[in-house]
Image: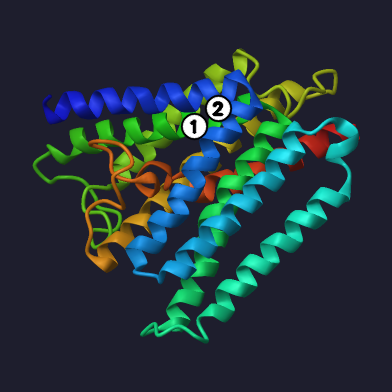
Amino acid sequence: MSEFWKRTLSGAVYVVAVVGSILWHPAAFGALFLVISTWGVSEYHRLMGSSTIARGGAVIGGAVMWLGCMWWLLAPEGLSRSWGIYALLGVIYVLVIFATLLEELWSKAANPVANWGNLFVSQTMIALPFCSMCALVALDKWLLLALFVLIWVNDSGAYCVGSLTAKRPQGNHKMFPRVSPKKSWEGLFGGFFFAILAALLLMHFGWFDTLWSKTEIIGANRLVYFIVIAFAVLACGFGTLGDLMESLMKRTIGVKDSGHFLPGHGGVLDRFDSMLLASPMLAIYSWICYAASSLF
C-alpha cells in the first residue's frame, strides 16, 4: 500500500473513531481517550529519555486522573457528587507521584531533576489537558465535537491558503521559520477565516446552544454570534500555539515525529498537539458562558 493511501486510510479511521466515540456514549469516549491520553504521556517520556520508573509513574498518574473525570461523567447523579471516590483516587494519585519522585533518590539516573521535571510537565501539559475534554463533554458533547471540527478546518484552511500564497513570486510571510518553516501569517488568518465560517454554520445546527440559550433577552441574537466567533478564534489561536509548541519540542530534541500512533500521521502528540492548549481554554470559556447564561 502506498504512503498516500496508508495515510488516508489511517486518517479516516482516526476521524471515525474520535467522532464516533464522542457521539456514541461517554463510556466509549472514556475508553478511547484513556488509551490516547496515557499513550501521549508515555510518548512524551520516551522522547525525553525519562527513566522507566518516571515514565510508568506518569502513565499511572495520568490514568488515575482520567478515571476521576470519567467517574464524574458516568456515575449516577448521587454517586458522582460523592467525594469518597475522588478522595480515594486523589490519595492514589498523590502516592503514585510521590513514590515516583522518591524513586529518583535510589536510582542511578544521570539527571534525576530532568525526570522530575518531565513527570510534572507530562501531567500538567498532557494528562490534564486531555482530562479537560471531559469538562466539555459534561457540558455538551457537541462542544467537544465542534472543537475538533474547528481545529481540523483551521488546519486544512491554513494549509490551503499557505500553499497558495507560497506560490507568489514574493512568497508568503513566515510566522516562526525556526520552529515551523511552512507556517505563514497568511495561512494563519486563512485558517481563522474558514474556521469562523464553519463555526457559524455549526451554530445554525444547534451545536453551541448550551453556551447561550437566552434568546428572549434583547440583543441576544447578536451576542450569540460574538460568543460563537470567540469560540472559533480561541480554538484556532490556542490550537496553533499548541502545534507550534510541539514543533519546538521536536526540533529541540531532533525528531520528525513524536511517535508511531497512526501510519503516516506520527504519534499521539502529533495528532493532538492542537488540543493540548485549546481544550482547557475552551472548557474554561464554555463554562463561563454557560454560567453567565444561567444568571439571566
User: Which residue is at a point 69% across and 44% down the rendered structure image?
Assistant: 69
The residue closer to the viewer here, 65 or 283, is 65
Q: Secondary structure at mark 1?
A: helix
User: Which residue is at a point 61% across and 40% down the rendered structure image?
Assistant: 133
Residue furthest out toward the left? 169
The residue closer to the viewer here, 207 or 11, is 11
User: Which residue is at a point 11% across and 26% down the rendered structure image?
Assistant: 2
Give amino acid for label 1. Phe
Task: Say the numbered circle drawn on residue 145.
Answer: 2
What residue sits right under mark 1 in the picture? 148
- CA separation, marks 2 and 1? 5 Å
Q: Could you say which quadrant of the image residue 48 lies in?
A: bottom left
Q: Secondary structure at mark 2?
A: helix
Q: Could you say which quadrant of the image residue 62 lies in?
A: bottom right
Q: Could you say which quadrant of the image residue 231 lies in?
A: top right
Query: Where is residue 206 drawn, in percent x and y?
Result: 65, 16
The residue closer to the viewer here, 171 or 152, is 152
Give amino acid for label 2. Leu
The residue closer to the viewer here, 241 or 214, is 241
Is 294 left, or right, of 50 in this rendering? right
Is 208 left, or right, of 187 in this rendering? right
User: Which residue is at a point 53% across and 38% down the rendered structure image?
Assistant: 33
Q: Are marks 2 and 1 in contact (CB under 8 Å)?
A: yes
> Dot 2, how many residues are within 10 Å of its Cα: few (below 14), some (14-19), or many (20+)?
some
Which image quadrant: the C terminus? Answer: top right
Task: Say the numbered circle drawn on residue 8.
Answer: none
Is 112 left, or right, of 261 in this rendering? right
Which image quadrant: the N terminus? Answer: top left
Query: Where is residue 23 drawn, in percent x and y?
Result: 58, 20
